[in-house]
Amino acid sequence: MMRIGDAFRYQLYQTALSNLEGQLDNTAEEVASGKKVMVPSDDPASYAQNLEILAQQSQNTQYKNNLDSLQAQGSYYQTSVNSISNVLSSIQQLAIEMASSTVDANSRASAANQVDDLIQQLVTVGNTKVGDTYIFGGTMAANAPYTSNGTFQGSAEVGQVAVSSSTTVDAGISGQTIFTGTANGQAVDIFQTLQTFSQDLSSNNTAGLQTDLGNINNCVDLTANNLAYVGTYTKNISNLLTANSNTDTTLSEDSSDLVSADMAKAISDYSTLSTAYQAALYTMAKVESLNILDYLPA
Amino acid sequence: MSVTTILNIAQSALDASQVAIQTTSHNIANVDTPGYSEQQAVLEEATPTPMSIGLMGNGVSVEQIKSYYDQSLQNAITNQNSGVQQQQTLETSLTQVQSIFNEDNSQLSTNLTTFFNDWSTLSTDPTSTADKETLASDGESLCTTFNTMYSDLVNLQGSLNGQVNSQIADINNTTSQIASLNKLIAESTNGTSEANDYIDQRNQLVQQLSGYMNISYFTDASNMVDVLTANGSSLVDDGVSYQLTVDPNATTGLTDVGLQGPSGSSQDITSQISGGSLGALLTTRDTTIPGYMNNLNGLAQSIMQNVNYFHEQGNDSAGIPFFQSSTANYAQGISLASQIENASGAVQTQNIMASSSTANPTGNDVALAIASLANETVLGDNTVTSTAASSATTPLGLTGHLAIDGVPITVGVGDSLSTIMTNINAVTGQTGVTASITQSSAGYQLVLTASSSSGNISVANGDLDTSSQSLLQTLTTNPVNAGTAMNLTGTIQLGAGNGGNEYSVSVQPTDTLTDVMTNINNINALDNTGVVASLSTNGSGDSVLVLTKGSQISIPSGTITGTIGLAGATYADYEAGVVANIGQATKTATNLSTYNQNMLTSLQQQQSQESGVSIDDEMSNLIKFQNAYQAAASIYTTAETLMNSLLEAVGITT
């Protein structure tokens, strides 16, 4: 025969009810917070994995910030190289005119002044400053990289910027890359070429002007290449930004899969548990009413 | 046979019913008393009187008050209670540890990532004062996080210690009550309600005591319970109890549990207490929390040393640390260096380095290197060995930065286990850590051996590095064909201990013994190590290597203790691993707590069937005995009528 002591019967009810209450609390918290893993012990593996994902996501956001600043800088490079290209076009025009045998020494001298002005324009472009940074200074970007006669005082080196956990890109473009280089198989130095051109104009050196014309053509070609280079540089950064944004979406989804509550399930669990709780209370009340004392004469 | 006999029988029936009703009342009164076992008056017919017509009944007598309890069931409950209390206490204390590590509270992972992100930001604008201010402020948050988490652990340890002290007092109280009850039980008569009540109370106390700690106990011939610790030291011996004492440990400042034995001297029994709530408190206090403290220390140490390593290279190796350099209490004491934040709390942005060269003021190599630490594999604790590689000499494709006892070892993509080993062994003089490679069925593994000051292996003549030892032992003792590839890998370090340069001779799988000999002799020719190798060939044509420097160098055998290796995790992953670990421990304690509680409930249910008081039963008994009493009373009336009739018959009227 099964007989249960009264004290223990109450204890059983107590345990059953407090278990249900605990589960109800947890489910309510799940619904309220939208998270199914709230403390590590809820699901240690998922919790830890989510921590790792959140760390990755935070890093990824940092890479996005890095890319954003590179992209902003990239547009300045584009503008700068475009201006160089425009200046060189006008100089090329001038060089063609001045190479002609019909031009006299006076016209050439006045053209020399024009070229000097244009050189100053290029120096200004070379000393473009964004915030505190001279964008053509390389790793010595705190001071103006070009002197008024176009001598480079910056660094040919550029820093690296991390754009993913395994990739870095150049932090910018050094003036050295833009104003010097190789075109048509020949070494090109834009400032040097223009200085010589200006001197040849002043001294009315017709033979020199012919050579200068060839050199200026090389400068124009170098700048055309540079325009393409800057285009690729900025395009690469926007591609990286797209990849970055995709990574972010994937990480958010992964994180959500790991720790976010399935609302429909949580809410239906909650109502199931409430019903169970009510049923337990009802049963307890019913069973307790089966008390011998109610049936004994007073 | 007389009317008086009838009165006597009625008397006995009234007495018996009264005792039964009293017992029932006692049961009802104790329906909610913990540990109370239902009692019942055992009735027995009184010794009959032999008559000519046979035996005539003499009424009823109460034989004893029986207590319904099953000692073996009670023992099972007592033992189960030890497990329940242990797991419940573990659950509670681990939940507290968990809340310290819970990211929502600690923000360690967030602060860690933010800190390294700040370096990345600085790398995009290396001269920005604003970025440097942010960096110093986030660096300080990271330090504070470590400091707070560590001191929370210390406080938790202290609070658990307080609980240990109060439980020791509770245990003493319990054992002395058991001893008193032992005496009372020995003095009282068996089978009385009084004795039953004492036994119930004592059972309850023993059950409580086993909830506190793991004990063994038995009932002796005089019905007294003797209680022993796990190792058999006496806690209760008949009517005497021995007190536990609070003995503060001189080193840790925490309580050691002492036992004041019969001799009066106290012995340390801390290690014997593994169960019950006290066992759980001691485990958490002495093992779990110190373990997590070590994890935090390891993380803080690695960050401090690695960040400082790169930061000190800033501004032409100006040697300015970012974190205050220390050699102990890493998590507890980590702070920004005084060069970064001065005593009055002002940030010295000019001392925060982004570039390694003053010639390249807007260079960002330092900032970039520190930022990339976030993605690098860092050193774990000292029980992990590296993931097995299929070869010791092929590049692992890992990049990272190992802090070996404070000296950073950079691991490049092209490095093999063998390269890493050589790099680690090149700085053994500074670190006291030697690397070797073991080969097992799992593949090749890097094993780092930390030499303790006393366990240092002394090497003859100071010409060989300790790391060379096992390889050299093989080469000098196992005869092989000198012209056949040996498939051995390792490095022989020459010149260690001389205070001069150390030269490595690398041994590749394809090397023959002759190759090794030639390489050692080439190094001698180039760098004048003084160590000369030759071959000694035995009768069957196999050779061993002989090393001499003046006289033959003996390769000593030594004891190697402790291994450290690559955890294969970034800082963030390592931190997540620690959190997963504490989460898992808490989850296990919770599950075991539920399991043990369910087991206990099921035992209690059995006990309740056996010993519990049921009001239904008692009420029906009450009615039964009440009716019996009424019936016995009516016997009186009948006997009285009989007596009166008799008296009337003899002419006496009442």
Image (cartoon, coloured by chain):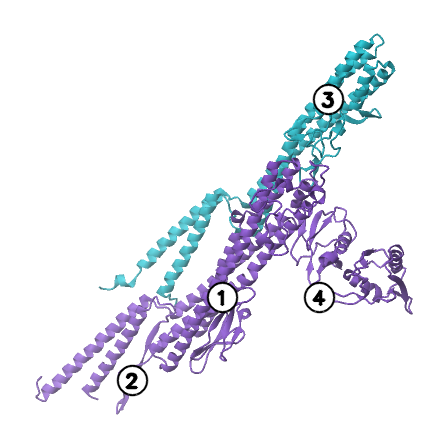
Chain colours: A cyan, B purple
Q: Are marks 4 and 1 in contact (CB under 8 Å)?
A: no
Q: Earlier in the sequence, mark 2 or mark 4?
A: 2
- According to the picture, the residue beneath numbered tag 3 turns out to be A122
Residue type pointed to by label 2: Ala
Among the 4 quarters of the image, the one containing residue A226: top right
Residue type pointed to by label 4: Gly
Write down the chain letter for disc 2: B
What distance separates the C-alpha of mark 1 from that of mark 3? 81 Å
Q: Residues within 10 Å of mark 4 (few under 14, many from 20)?
A: few
Nearest to viewer (mark 4 / mark 1): 4
Nearest to viewer (mark 2 / mark 4): 4
- Residue A284 lies, with reference to residue A213, above or below; the image says below
- According to the picture, the residue beneath numbered tag 1 turns out to be B278
- According to the picture, the residue beneath numbered tag 4 turns out to be B455
Q: Residue furthest bottom?
A: B52
Residue type pointed to by label 3: Leu
x and y percentages locating residue B29 in the rendered image: 30, 69
Nearest to viewer (mark 4 / mark 3): 3
Quarter containing the N terminus of chain B: bottom left
What distance separates the C-alpha of mark 4 from that of mark 1? 36 Å
